Amino acid sequence: MRLLLLLTSLMLGAGVVIAAEQRVVLKEGPGRDKVEANCTACHSLDYIVGNSPFMSRQVWDAEVTKMIKVFGAPISEGDAKEIADYLTKNYGPL
């Protein structure tokens, strides 16, 4: 009986955590579609919003390059520039 109660509590708790998650909506702007299409293939958009206060143009360029060269993201050179432009303009340092 205790095991059943424990399992039920855990399942209900997990449901509350899942329900509390909210979808990240990026700021409007040129390049947002490229960011959403490419970046979400591997990770949540939370990373962009969470790290943005620390990210200069140079750092965004380095991050996009790392995603391509280290993690193998299939992003063209033109899309990489557009992604870095968007991220710098909308999620660069204040």
Image: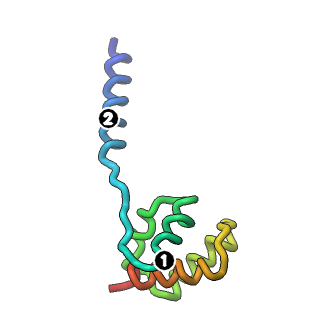
User: Horizontal and vertical percent for residue 55?
Assistant: 44, 81
Which residue, given by chain and number where applicable, does mark 2 sit on?
13
Which residue, given by chain and number where applicable, does mark 1 sit on?
31
Image side of residue 18 versus residue 57, left or right: left
Q: Secondary structure at mark 2?
A: helix
Q: Disc 2 or disc 1, which is closer to the eye?
A: 1
Residue type marked 2: Gly
The image quadrant where one finds the C terminus is bottom left
Residue type marked 1: Gly
> Closer to the N terminus: mark 2 or mark 1?
2
User: What residue lies at 56% left-to-right and 76% top-to-bottom?
Assistant: 63
User: What residue lies at 41% left-to-right and 85% top-to-bottom?
Assistant: 89
Report the disc number at residue 1.
Answer: none
Question: Within 10 Å of the Cα at label 2, are there few (<14), some (14-19), or many (20+) other Cα atoms?
Answer: few
Q: Is residue 24 above or below residue 80?
A: above
Callouts 2 and 1 close, C-beta under 8 Å: no
Q: Quadrant of residue 93?
A: bottom left
User: Horizontal and vertical percent for residue 72?
Assistant: 69, 66
Q: Secondary structure at mark 1?
A: loop
Q: Between marks 2 and 1, how big is the CA–CA gap?
A: 38 Å
